[in-house]
Image (spheres, rainbow, N blue to C red):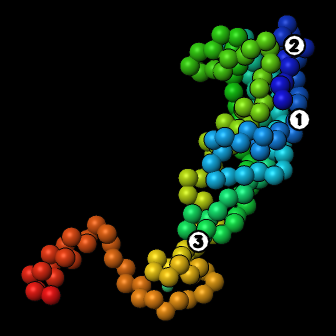
Amino acid sequence: MYLDLTSIKNDKNVVLEFAEKINLETLGEGFGNFTSDKPFLITGTVQNTNDGFYLKGRITGEVHTNCSLCLSNIELKVDLFVERLYKLVADEDSYALVDFKINLDELVFEETVLNLPLKPVCHHDCKGLCPVCGENLNERECSCSHEEIDIRLLPLKQLLEKQKGV
Ligand SMILES: [Zn+2]
Ligand SMILES: [Zn+2]
């Protein structure tokens, strides 16, 4: 989906409003463990300024993924604001504008991916899976021993046990 700026390319006083549905699932590759089955919505304005074409917008949608701790399916809401400057010749503060068209698929994809959590969780205090039996500890307590061993302290523990002759 391209946003065509031809209508404002010679007019610095006009603000172009837009609202488009973007299907992210068609982008597939690079979206990692996140999937999306409903279109995203991007709404906003573009203004032709002395610096370039200034886009201000809001992206909303939802993605599905798995909790990084207990692996249950979760849905995350995406709701973010974006500001970008487009220029015919891009510099480090701006994006390139080709044929006076903005690629909205790319924009929504890039901004969404940037804002997705690296370790999504179903709940801020998700108990995760039992490392011994794999039980989802949010649903049930298992009978495994959950002696917590800090892996960084493991060499020290082994050393102490050696000294004690265990
Ligand atoms: Zn979880
Ligand atoms: Zn267990």
Tell me: residue 121, above or below residue 147. above
Q: Earlier in the sequence, mark 2 or mark 1?
A: 2
Quadrant assignment, res 144? bottom left
Query: In the rendered image, which residue does mark 3 sit on?
Result: 70
Callout 2–callout 1 Cβ contact below 8 Å:
no
Residue located beneath label 2 in the image: 6
Q: Is mark 3 within 8 Å of ligand 1?
A: yes
Residue at left offset 78%, top offset 23%: 102
Residue 20, image quadrant: top right
Residue 59 seen in this snapshot: no
SS class of the residue under badge 1? Answer: strand
152 with respect to 146 (left or right) = left
Confirm if mark 1 falls within 8 A of ligand 1. Answer: no
Name which of mark 3 and mark 2 comes first in the sequence. Answer: 2
Q: Secondary structure at mark 2?
A: helix
- Residue 14 appears at what percent x and percent y? 88, 17
Category of crowding for the residue at label 1, using alpha-carbon neighbours closer than 10 angstroms: few (below 14), some (14–19), many (at least 20): some
* Among the two numbered marks 3 and 1 on one chain, the one whose residue lies closer to the N terminus: 1
Q: Nearer the viewer, residue 166 or 85?
A: 166
Position of residue 80 measured from the top left corner of the image (x, y, whole percent) = 72, 44
Three-letter code, disc 1? Ala
Q: Is residue 117 left or right of residue 52?
A: left
In front: 34, or 7? 34
Type of residue at label 2?
Thr
Image point (76%, 51%), residue name: 36
Ligand 1: image quarter: bottom right
Of badges 3 and 1, the one in the foreground is 3
Amino acid type, residue under disc 3 in the picture:
Cys
The residue carrying mark 1 is 19
